[in-house]
Image (cartoon, coloured by chain):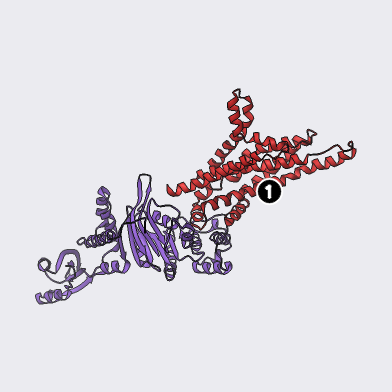
Chain colours: A purple, B red
Amino acid sequence: MIKIDHLVKNYGANCAVDDISFEIAPGEIVGFLGPNGAGKSTTMNILAGYLSSTAGRVMVDGLNVLDEPLEVKRRIGYLPEQPPLYLDMTVEEYLIFVYNLKGCTFNRTKHLEEICEVVKIQDVYKRVIRNLSKGYRQRVGIAQALIGNPPVIIFDEPTVGLDPKQIIEIRNLIRTLGKDHTVILSTHILQEVQAVCDRIIIINKGKVVADELTENINRVADGNRRYRAKICGPQREVLNMLNDRSDVSYVEALPARDGDAYTFLIESAPNVDMRKSLFYTLAQKGWPLVGLEPLGMSLEDVFISIVDKTGEGERAKKGAAKGRRGRTGTDLEKDIAQSIIDATAEAQKNIAPYSEEE
Amino acid sequence: MFAIFKKELRAYFTSPVGYVYTGIFLAAAALICAFTTIQQASYNTTTYFQYMIFTFIILIPLLTMRSFSEERKMRTEQLLLTAPVTITGMVIGKYLAAFALFVSTVLVSCINFFPLISYAIIEKSSAANGAHVGPVGGQVVGCLIGVILIGACFIAVGLFISSLTESQLSAAVITVAAIAVMILVGVFNQFIGVAWIRTVLDWISVLSRFDHFAYGLFDFSALLYYLSVAGVFLFLTVRVYEKRRWG
């Protein structure tokens, strides 16, 4: 549906988007993730035809944005970061204006009614936009993007400034839209992408640093590699025993105690399930295992280390130190981040160089 | 394009700007008409139209100041530029809206001629046979066309300036200055001694070309001049947007 090919955008000497390539299949919901100023909005603006690229090619539905801008724009509904609303119009007037602007031909009343129902703005239909709350304005902005039923919908930070209930509603809405639209949304909230997107593209410093299906990332992060174990036994000996095991890559005694049980943080070696053998060993030694709790990994930390690793110099180091946020254990997150970065870099390398002739 | 035209025209009257503009225009026109014709006991409307052009220094910026600067400030231009409308279509839609409002006020201001005509009818009955009494039709129509063309020119200049800035106020101030210069060049060039400078300024001057209309002549070269000035500034406005896209 969408093909971005070696896209570059320079603002003077400043490079906002630096050689980005990816493809999006019809019906996919893709999340653009990245810190502020990473190039998310610029990429979306280029896709929507608001900005032009310095180099590279953007194809929507097989049409080049530069060659057939109007046809491409007809296929895209776009909600910019700040919803483009005329404050002195009523919602009705505004939506009718957008309807006319997009040159739609189907039944207007019915179409607008349907959209208002989807985004739940019937109550404010006759009100002046200036008097609406942020949440309603955002919804009117979404309604605007949906007019004309475009196959591609682009949302730039759709949930910023909304209350938690509204955020959930908008997320549900986006998921519903994803059933018959291709949706691209940008955000810097990780949970949001995790909650609604099929695929995550992380952009940092104008480059794609990670491009992975959400389920893959979730699977990696849920992988049972880190546990909290409660063992009744002499703390030092237990620690030594665990340290000697080949299927344990890291052990740490935690200060928490539960009755006469000591708490340990254990990380298993990759791709090994050491739970059963740990149980038998402890049983043999006569140190009852009273608790074994898998600790999921924090995607947040994976994300932060991806961003840190792909950043540069001082800032990256500082960020990395902060990124740990006092967690214990080894840098599993960093390993995962690195593997995602490497996989993406490898995939990016394999993208054919862009040629004008095609 | 038509959607933008309609929206713009509507916007003039959902904000005070449109009312302020029409109000000042009609009031000023009526005053000028009273002072230049009735008070002078004259049927010659040339001075009336010439003074009317001076009011454009204030009036045209009212029409054009918010056109693009407001869209840019409120980020609504993102909607227009990502909609299936060309930049040219957007600029022309906005231009036509301002122009339509302008032409309608000029036409409405023609009610100022009713007192003149009614005076003329009364006087005619007592005048010598065959003598023409009242405003000269050709002259009035010529002046109206001239005024409308000059307005068309100034609106294009105003829109161009509006597209350069995010602030309505600076758009207004710069437009006032620009239109004032375009008009005053013609007034002051008679004080310049050097002949060639005078020729150049005369060529730039918007007013010098108006004189032909004031004689009731339809000057084709003037028509071409006004239309091309308007065209050039509209083209420049489109370029401003193109450039910003690529910048």
Position of residue A164 relative to residue B198, above or below, is below
Parent chain of label 1: B
**Which corner quadrant holds the C terminus of chain A?**
bottom left
Q: Which residue is mark 1?
A: B104
Decide which of A333, A106 is in the foreground and name it.
A106
| Residue B3 location (% of width, % of height) | 58, 57
Q: Is residue A158 left or right of residue B111?
A: left
Question: Helix or strand or loop: what does disc 1 sit on?
Answer: helix
Q: Residue at x 24, y 58 (%)?
A: A326
Could you say which is closer to the camera, residue B188 or residue B138? B138
Type of the residue with mark 1: Ser
Q: Nearer the viewer, residue A18 or B149?
A: B149
Quarter where residue A170 is shown: bottom left
- Near-viewer residue (A231 or A146): A146
The number of callouts visible is 1
**Neighbour tally class for label 1: few under 14, some 14-19, many 20 plus, Cα within 10 Å:** few
Q: Is residue B208 visible to us here?
A: yes
From the viewer's perspective, is B118 left or right of A166? right
Residue A91 position within the rendered picture, expressed as x and y whole percent measured from the top left: 56, 61
B84 to B169, vertically: above or below? below
